Amino acid sequence: MPRPELSPNTFGAVLGLVAFAIFSTHDLIIKQLGGAYSVFQIVFFTALFSFPIITLVLMRDHKASTLQPRHPYWMGLRCISGAASGLCAFYAITQLPLSQVYAFIFAAPLIITLLAIPILGEVVRLRRGVAIGVGMIGVLIVLQPGASPLEAGHIAALVAAFAGAMVSIITRKIGKDERGVVMIMYPMMTNLILTAMVLPFVYVQVPLHDMGLLALDSFLVLIAMALLVAAYTRADAMVVAPMQYSQMIWATLFGIFLFGEYPTWSTYLGTVVIALSGFYILRREATSDVSSTTPVSKTRTRIGHVASLRVGHVLRRNRTKGMD
């Protein structure tokens, strides 16, 4: 019998599931290393190990143009936001159960929709406005203000989601005008320079085993990014983007079997509320004319990693090469 072939959307969904499983493995390594090293040291080495591979990607950009950004102020804000998102996400991962961190990362589409109003001129009508409100209620369910103390890790996770959303919105605003090499190089150098400035004050000797984990961590992010590029090339955003919610399964398994962390009912309930509201916003953007800029459906990179390479940059470069 002939072997049935997967449809493009099904294949894209499978690639997305694998990509987000790899992202979760990356987060697991960060959590394990966080007990021994400062988040600044972890970010520095993960960014440093990403540098050679990303440089190879940049070398394939043969467009003759300057490396000076056309929108320096927006680029500066994007670089600072990207560094803040990575640092805060890594810190939150080392301090909180992964399930709680993911709940806040899942709230990014809500924040993106809000930021799109002043920055992109997006008009948010009643239904999406209600979805944002419901999603924010989900965040409050996870936080449980008053019922449990608000820790630094919770604040870091919220900042990571907000800063990551800012990166996505700015990318949407200036991405068509800036070269891909500029969009990648400046944030990458910002991560390295900022963490290098702090590194002498927090540095701890790294044994060869942990250095290998840091290198592996950087490699895993790039592999996950490549899989997401392949997924979005083959399938609709509506199919691939929701695959990020599968990370909650990995967070639960890792937490129970490796760290003895059992997510509370509020984490599960809040995550479901956040995920449903984010999925509704994505669906409204993809299937109706309510959005002129589609800020969420065009956000393809998972928020909270330090590699400045983004899915959108690679997709745009591939489309440009196809037209040459």
Image (tube, rainbow, N blue to C red):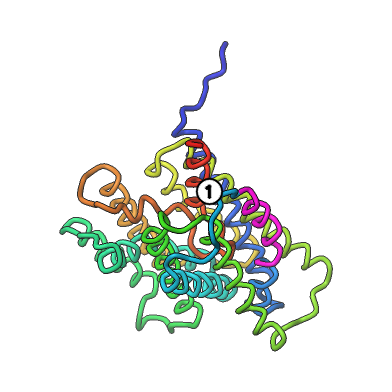
Is residue 57 a member of the stretch shown in magenta?
Answer: yes
Magenta stretch, overall SS? helix
Residue projecting furthest to the bottom: 201
Q: Residue at x 34, y 66 (%)?
A: 111
x, y (%) of residue 110? 32, 62
Residue projecting furthest to the top: 1
- What count of labels does the image hold? 1
Helix, strand or loop status at disc 1: helix
x, y (%) of residue 126? 15, 59
Q: Which class describes the residues within 10 Å of circle 1: few (<14), some (14-19), or many (20+)? A: some
Callout 1 amino acid:
Val
Q: Is residue 268 visible?
A: no
Along the viewing direction, whichever of 36 and 51 lies nearer the viewer: 51
Residue projecting furthest to the right: 208
Q: Residue at x 53, y 73 (%)?
A: 83
Is residue 272 a member of the stretch shown in magenta?
Answer: no
Q: Residue at x 44, y 44 (%)?
A: 240
x, y (%) of residue 107? 38, 63
Q: Is residue 235 visible?
A: yes
Q: Quadrant of residue 34?
A: bottom right
Using residue 313 as the reference point, say whether residue 170 is left or right of it.
left
User: Where are the magenta residues, as a range?
Assistant: 47-60
With respect to residue 68, does 1 lie above or below? above
Residue, disc 1 = 314
x, y (%) of residue 229? 53, 45
Q: Quadrant of the N terminus?
A: top right
